[in-house]
Amino acid sequence: MLRDMDDVLYDKKWAKVAENLELYYMYRDLFLSRRDGDLFKDQGIRYDITIIPPLMLGCEYVKTAGHYHPKVPGEDVTYPEVYEVLEGEATYLLQKEDLSDVVVVRARGGDKVVVPPDYGHITINESNKRLKMANFVARDFSSIYDPIKERGGGAYFLTEDGFVENPRCEDAAPLREIEVPKAKALGLSRNREIYPIGRERGTLDWLLRPQDYMDIFEGFLD
């Protein structure tokens, strides 16, 4: 709901008079069959779908609240995640918690976008179409929302005039845009949906044990 997003919106003047709108819809822990559900659970992964209708939040494009992931127990690396655009177009803002790197990735139907370890992320729908995306993530952790909330949003806001710096993120690195990173080494390809990949034991093990795949994640967003 809009009121849940008040702290991270750019257009505060609009937000003060706007109705409490539903901004996006999250459907978690989905599966097509009980067998799939048991298989995902046994592997420690979860399949979700998020739908973000086209909408303007004043002069800012509709977005998710944004969050980070916790560190893997006993390791100095956070859990990664993979998104797939099923319909529409997505703009992903990826940022390190210390804001030493801030990256934007624009994706369309079929694209797979990996959020590598140690990055938080915000999803933006800047198109006039409904955005529907799926994700796989490790199932046994809770996302961390406070760091982005405490800074009043991500390092940059996407408005109708383009990206605008968050004045409460003065220490943020310059925003850089990259193409969707290739993720073949992680078992992903553009012409195959991620859902059936979740049925293959071990293929998404990097979601649970990223510390064993740091040679792949090193420089992943370069």
Image (cartoon, rainbow, N blue to C red):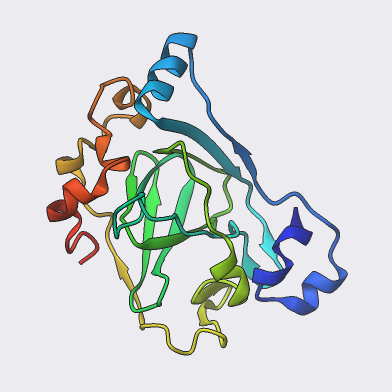
Report whether 8 appears left or right of 78. right
Q: In front here: 168 or 222?
A: 168
33 relative to 197, above or below = above
Q: Position of residue 108 (x, y in %)?
A: 39, 47
Q: Which of the 4 quarters of the picture holds residue 41?
A: top left
Q: Position of residue 144 (x, y in %)?
A: 53, 58
Q: Which residue is found at the position 69% from the left and 71% from the top? A: 7
Report whether 148 appears left or right of 173. right
Q: Which of the 4 quarters of the picture holds residue 130?
A: top right
Q: Which residue is found at the position 17% from the left and 64% from the top? A: 219
Q: Which residue is found at the position 62% from the left and 69% from the top? A: 149
Q: Quadrant of the C terminus?
A: bottom left
Q: Residue furthest front?
A: 74
Q: Position of residue 141 (x, y in %)?
A: 48, 44
64 relative to 87, above or below = below
Report whether 40 appears left or right of 129. left
Q: In front here: 39 or 101?
A: 39
